[in-house]
Image (spheres, rainbow, N blue to C red):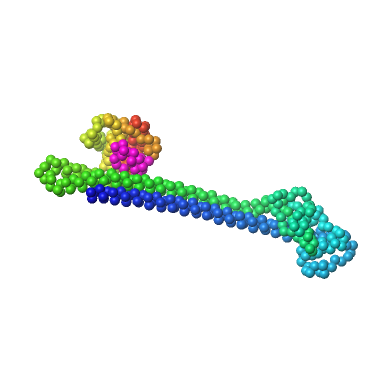
């Protein structure tokens, strides 16, 4: 009962850790997306405010020229219609500012001489002034009433998107005014804002690329975390069986019930020893993989004969296998430059895999040949094969954990360290391992062992 409770606690702890890490990864993703949205909104707001400021500046610059054009037009008209009369502007208007002077002159000219402002003449002066200040000269001059209704216009080119200046009064009662409509101010707007927009676009592209890379990294990390969690769960699940066997066997022996039954006692000792060796081998393999990954394992490379290694592995496999097994060995190349211990363990893992994923009758072929760079050692079986999708991950340390449940239901135990071990050993030798497989037909693993120089 204590053993079952301990197993439940261990499983619960692993699952809780999985959920906690998954929630943490999702939190980082939400924060990253939120940051991207915030940056886009802030940058969009800044660009909109800059656009509005630029449009306002253009409108004000153009509007500042309109009173001058009105002044020149009024002065020219007054010189014609007043015939030398002096317009007493200070008395007509309480100040001598340009705007008030134009308003007073036009009011007097309209009341006294019945002379209204000439939009065509005003347009000529306005065209010259806009040219001097470097603004677009596509415009329409509007005469409006006190309510903003258009009474006259200098041309029919005004567009619905025209940028209008403020209204400048030409009557002391503010009943009439002149307004300038810039029909195409947007080239100037674009010219001013194009560096900002280009810089903003570059920033958004870079930020977007960084965010996408971050999200991809988070997804990769989540996938790796899921694989590690699956690996941890699978490892806990598969370690429970030998640990349970060891504990139960030890307790049974400790009870004294088999003290006078040597055969049964020896059987329990063998089970405990076998399961302990299995766990020790697993731990050693994990440590070896860790050393290989961190480049801390020193290989003792020398000229190694393949025949005795393979003969020994074949004999052990036949002894352990509970199914009929037939080996075919054809070594065209009999020697390699390698660390004998780790090479033998790598080949052993491939043979074990062939047996684990076998059908009722096992056929394993081991061959060797060479090319210009490598000795190719191949282990081929007639087993259940490996799908294309699984072939991409089987050499990852946590790869088979992702399909562990499926394998476990199919009667296969373990959690996928063997092929990663093979991959790490071959990389440490300066070589590689590849797989060719067809579902429900065969699998063939090839070790590429560098030739001695």
Q: Tell me the quadrant of the picture where the C terminus can be found.
A: top left
The extreme right residue here reads 83
Rendering coords of residue 408 (x, y %) = 31, 39
Residue at 11% x, 42% y: name it.
Answer: 261
Rendering coords of residue 88 (x, y %) = 84, 68
Magenta stretch bounds: 393-415
Residue 338 in view (yes/no): no
* Magenta stretch: includes residue 406: yes
Q: Is residue 46 left or right of residue 224?
A: right
Q: Is residue 26 left or right of residue 247?
A: right
Rendering coords of residue 164 (x, y %) = 71, 55
Residue at 67% x, 51% y: name it.
Answer: 186
Rendering coords of residue 39 (x, y %) = 53, 54
The extreme left residue here reads 260
Q: Which image quadrant for residue 331?
A: top left
Q: Is residue 198 left or right of residue 122?
A: left
Task: Count the labels in the image.
Answer: 0
* Magenta stretch: includes residue 261: no
Residue 345 in view (yes/no): yes
Residue at 81% x, 58% y: name it.
Answer: 73
Q: Nearer the viewer, residue 213 or 153?
A: 153
Q: Nearer the viewer, residue 208 or 296?
A: 208
Q: Nearer the viewer, residue 265 or 312?
A: 265
Residue at 82% x, 67% y: name it.
Answer: 92
Q: Nearer the viewer, residue 308 or 452?
A: 308
């Amino acid at each position: 009962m204590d053993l079952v409770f301990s197993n439940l606690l261990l499983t619960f702890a692993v699952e809780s850790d999985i959920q906690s890490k998954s929630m943490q990864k999702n939190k980082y993703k939400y924060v990253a997306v939120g940051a991207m949205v915030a940056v886009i909104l802030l940058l969009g707001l800044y660009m909109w405010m800059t656009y509005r400021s630029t449009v306002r500046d253009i409108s004000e610059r153009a509007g500042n020229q309109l009173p001058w054009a009105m002044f020149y037009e009024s002065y020219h008209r007054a010189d014609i219609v007043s015939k030398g009369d002096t317009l007493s502007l200070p008395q007509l208007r309480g100040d001598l500012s340009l705007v008030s002077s134009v308003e007073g002159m036009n009011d007097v000219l309209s009341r006294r001489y019945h002379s209204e402002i000439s939009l065509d003449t005003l347009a000529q002066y306005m065209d010259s002034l806009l040219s001097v200040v470097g603004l677009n000269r596509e415009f329409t001059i509007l005469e409006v009433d006190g309510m903003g209704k258009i009474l006259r216009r200098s041309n029919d080119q005004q567009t619905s998107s025209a940028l209008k200046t403020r209204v400048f009064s030409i009557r002391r009662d503010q009943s009439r005014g002149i307004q300038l409509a810039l029909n195409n101010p947007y080239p100037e707007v674009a010219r001013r804002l194009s560096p900002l927009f280009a810089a903003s676009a570059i920033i958004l592209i870079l930020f977007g690329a960084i965010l996408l890379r971050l999200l991809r990294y988070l997804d990769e990390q989540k996938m790796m975390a899921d694989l590690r969690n699956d690996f941890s769960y699978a490892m806990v699940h598969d370690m429970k069986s030998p640990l349970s066997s060891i504990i139960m066997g030890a307790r049974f022996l400790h009870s004294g019930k088999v003290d006078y039954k040597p055969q049964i006692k020896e059987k329990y000792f063998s089970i405990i020893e076998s399961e302990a060796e299995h766990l020790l081998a697993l731990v050693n393999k994990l440590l070896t993989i860790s050393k290989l990954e961190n480049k801390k394992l020193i290989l003792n490379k020398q000229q190694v004969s393949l025949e005795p290694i393979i003969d020994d592995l074949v004999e052990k496999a036949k002894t352990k296998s509970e199914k009929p097994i037939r080996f075919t060995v054809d070594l065209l190349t009999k020697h390699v430059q390698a660390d004998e211990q780790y090479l033998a363990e790598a080949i052993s893992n491939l043979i074990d895999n062939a047996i684990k994923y076998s059908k009722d009758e096992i056929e394993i072929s081991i061959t060797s040949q060479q090319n210009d760079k490598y000795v190719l050692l191949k282990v081929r079986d007639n087993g259940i094969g490996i799908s294309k999708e699984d072939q991409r991950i089987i050499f990852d340390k946590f790869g088979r954990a992702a399909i562990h449940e499926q394998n476990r239901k199919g009667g296969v135990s373990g959690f996928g360290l063997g092929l990663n071990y093979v991959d790490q050993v071959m990389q440490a030798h300066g070589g590689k391992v590849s797989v060719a497989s067809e579902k429900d037909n065969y699998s063939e693993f090839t070790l590429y062992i560098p030739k001695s120089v």
